[in-house]
Each structure stands twice: as structure tokens, then as C-alpha cells.
Image (cartoon, rainbow, N blue to C red):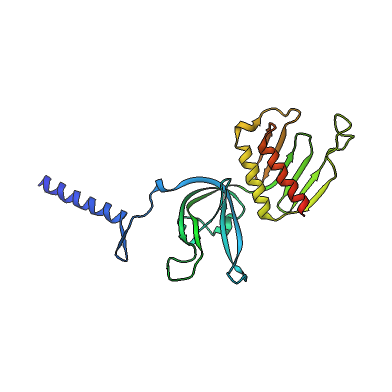
Amino acid sequence: MKKKLFAVSMICFLLIMFSCKIKKTDGNVNIPQTETDFIWKTGIITEEIFVDKGGRQHNDIKDFYFLTSDSEDFINVPKCSGIKGKMSDYSYWYVKARVKNFDGLWDTDDPNVQSRVGPYLIFDTIVKIDYPVKIIFSDGNANTYKITQSTITYTPVTKEESSSGIYSGGEAKIAGISIEQFADIFIDAESMVSNKSITTDKRQKGTGNINIEFKNSKKNTNFIECQSISNFQKSLDVLLNEN
């Protein structure tokens, strides 16, 4: 009797496990993604107004992208599961998310319907880290760049302020930037803060400094003279001179 009960129990167990893991759709077996298919990434969720192939803007439709230090990828929102609230609730937040990469149709699953196509991401978890509002960067000569979501301001060292009495950082400048450009600058700054090979505990002559201000916290980091800092400063100068 015990053997029969054991056999029946095992059969029921296997049927339950099988039915949980395998779902048939249109005659094809579809195995849902397991946890190992997703990886954790940090970045900023950005948004853009949808523009159709005719160049017409649709203000009521927004596309969302995940901006990281590696890339900026389209988020296929309808395929994201387990996300609390709307995707717009996370716009321009610095987040940690569990993501999986796909390649295929963006706007539909029907290959006979016109759609954008290419790489995209789906999320199953998003955790807000904090909301970035300002970045203050000082270069090795103590010239300062203040970046907000709408402006970038350059405050140079004057001859009177310099230790030599000769050096000048040039003319003060201010330029308007978009929130998308701010997000790009933040990701560059955050990636440098996370790179311990170029950071230092001491603020010595010739070192740079980045202060990232979030809605609820701050990060302050000193940097040795390196190519990353040089490239970062050049990108800020380009924005100042373009606008």
C-alpha cells in the first residue's frame, strides 16, 4: 500500500512540476525564463516621445531606454513582468534592475505586422537607488563645472586665485543642456566613481574631484590624473562650446 501511495505521489509531483515549467503556445513548447537568465545592472531609465516613420511625434506615447556605462537599450515595457507601478515612475532615477537581453520585434509579436526591430531588454525587477540632481566636477587646476538637469556652468580659476599668480582657467561659461544629456554625464561620472583604480582618498595638487548630489544622498570622490578624467572634461567643454 505504501509503495502504491509513493508511486501515485511521485506521478502527481512530476505532473505538477512539468505543468509549471512548460507552457504550450500554438503547438510550440515555450519554457519560461528562469532566474539565471537575468542579470543585475545599474543605470538610468530614460524616456523619449515616440516618433513614427513619417517623422510625426506622438506625445501620448513614450519609449523607455536603459542607459548604462555600456549602452543604451530599448525596454520592451509590455513584456516586463513584476514591475510595481508605471515605467514612467522610474524615469531618470538611478536604479538597479534585473534585465535580460533579447533581439527581435519591438512593437508586436506578429512578424506580419510592421514594427521596429533590434536588440531590447525586459525587466522583472527594478529597485530605485536614488534620484540624481546635480554633479560638481573640479579638475586638477581647481576649475569647476556645475551640472544640473538643465544647465552646465563653468567657473574658472582666475590669476588672482591661482597658486602661481599666472594661471587662468579662461572665461566663465554657462550653457543649457537636456535632461538626456544630464543622464549621460551622470552615467560617466558614476562609472568613474565606481572605478577604484583611478580614485584616491586624498585631494592633492593635480587631482580632480566629483561630487554627485542625489535627492537623498551624496557621493564625493577624488581622482588621480588619468585619461578618464581628461575625456570627461573634454565632453563637458564640448557641451559648453556647442550651446
The residue under the point 79% across, 34% down is: 141
The residue under the point 61% across, 31% down is: 197
- Quadrant hosting residue 178: bottom right
Which residue is the extreme one toward the left? 1
The image position of residue 28, as x and y in percent, is: 31, 62
The residue under the point 87% across, 38% down is: 158
**Count of numbered marks:** 0
Q: Which one is in front, 233 or 135?
A: 233
The residue under the point 78% across, 52% down is: 175
- Quadrant hosting residue 81: bottom left
Left of 85 or right of it: where is 191? right
Q: Quadrant of the C terminus?
A: bottom right
**Residue 59 against residue 131 in the figure, above or below:** below
The image position of residue 179, as x and y in percent, is: 68, 55
Decide if residue 180 is in sight here.
yes
**Residue 78 against residue 35 in the figure, above or below:** below
Q: Which one is in front, 123 or 227?
A: 227
Q: Which one is in front, 132 or 53?
A: 53
Left of 145 or right of it: where is 64? left
Decide if residue 215 is in sight here.
no
Left of 121 or right of it: where is 48? right
- Quadrant hosting residue 170: top right
Left of 129 or right of it: where is 23? left
The image position of residue 190, as x and y in percent, is: 63, 42
